[in-house]
Image (tube, rainbow, N blue to C red):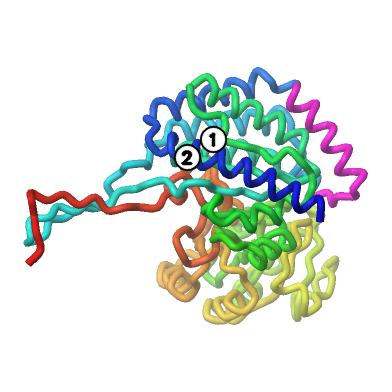
Amino acid sequence: MKDMVEADALIAKMGEAAREAAIELAQAPGERKYAALIGAAHEIRNRAPEILEANASDLEFGREKGLSEAMMDRLRLDEDRLRGIEDGLRAVAEQRDPVGEVITEWDRPTGLHIQRVRTPIGVIGVIYESRPNVTADAGALALKSGNAVILRGGSESLHSSTAIHGCMVEGLRQAGLPEASIQLVPTRDRAAVSAMLGAQGLIDVIIPRGGKGLVGLVQREARVPVFAHLEGICHIYVDRDADPEMARQVVLNAKTRRTGICGAAECLLIDWQFYTKHGAAVIEDLLAAGVEVRADGELAKIPGTAKAQPEDFGREFLDMIIAARLVDGVDEAIAHIRRFGSQHTESILTAKDATAERFFAGLDSAILMRNASTQFADGGEFGMGAEIGIATGKLHARGPVGAEQLTSFKYLVTGQGTIRD
């Protein structure tokens, strides 16, 4: 009880500061937000040794907690990933400022001129696990869209997130923007999560980024709106008209490039005519790369595969494991994905336009791809510079959540002494 009272007080204090900062950010010129992000990028470069030292402490903590290798990969920073964070900050800085953009405008017979204009949401709460780069991504996108943000990173990434947050705050300071624009909850106490979920009137939207346990908790207990995806159960379908060499390359990349991200392929569907004509090369490539292929039906006869269990379909492995089965054409693939998918990302490999169109029309996942790896389900790859997460709900934001998706809109109505009859 004492922990909860202290957490409520902490989040209330941070929330009040964030609301004050949000008022100033909503009116801040784009040049100052740009300067803050470029300043933060410089600090990431200058403080690289300090950040990597902090990350080493987090990795040790993660090993002691017994984190899986996939989770450890999410937690790990190195020179290349720090350059990626720096590049992401610069990319967000270079984007057009969405605040104040006129989405559409029109005139009415009454003489009114009406504009629908982008406006910040206000205060965003981001709750995430393991990946310390989210500290920079979320802070940058919130700032670009004129929102204040309260960040609650995973307990295992506290040192890394704190070091990166320090760079973000220095960028704000240099640009003359409120330091409370980007705040990091300075405790591992899980009571802070509950306090954020109940912070009505202080936090306008919660964005969880993590595993099924975290996202499910947020969706069950949040008393403020949530942008979220529960799982990334991504499918890749090899159609009968797929190019066999393309299929081999794309499937292998979709599964193995990084297994611990939500865009990693978790289920492989192969048209039986493709399999009859081209054989098991796609499966054999996965096996050779060290992937455990949990195969159903005819595919289970391929040497080296493991027999799939019913629960393997509709499961997010986040590991070197993939479920696989044969299907009879695109309609059966669509039916399987509708039953087992999480409406995150699905890809079809085919040379036939009509089949691709049927796949796109028959599914309602947030991201649908053709002849491309599901690993491209990422805000940076979509040209957003970064993302806070992939939203699979159907209201407000869907797919990669970038700066534009962190805005709402308002109507500006201009008359000339206009009165209503």
In the image, is 291 to the left or to the right of 100? right
Q: Nearer the viewer, residue 241 or 49?
A: 49
What residue span does the magenta drawing correspond to? Answer: 50-70
Quadrant where the C terminus is found in the figure: bottom left
268 magenta-colored:
no
387 is higher (above) or lower (below) than 359: above
The disc at residue 22 is: 2
What crowding class fits label 1: few (fewer than 14 Cα within 10 Å), some (14-19), or many (20 or more)?
A: many
Mark 2 or 1, nearer chain start = 2
Kind of residue sitting beneath label 1: Ser
At x 55% / y 58%, what residue is drawn? 227
Q: Residues within 10 Å of mark 2 (few under 14, many from 20)?
A: many
- Residue at x-position 35% and y-position 52%: 409
Q: Residue at x 76, y 73 (%)?
A: 312
73 with respect to 91 (left or right): right
Where residue 345 is drawn, which disc sits there? none
Tell me residue 164's x, y (percent): 67, 31
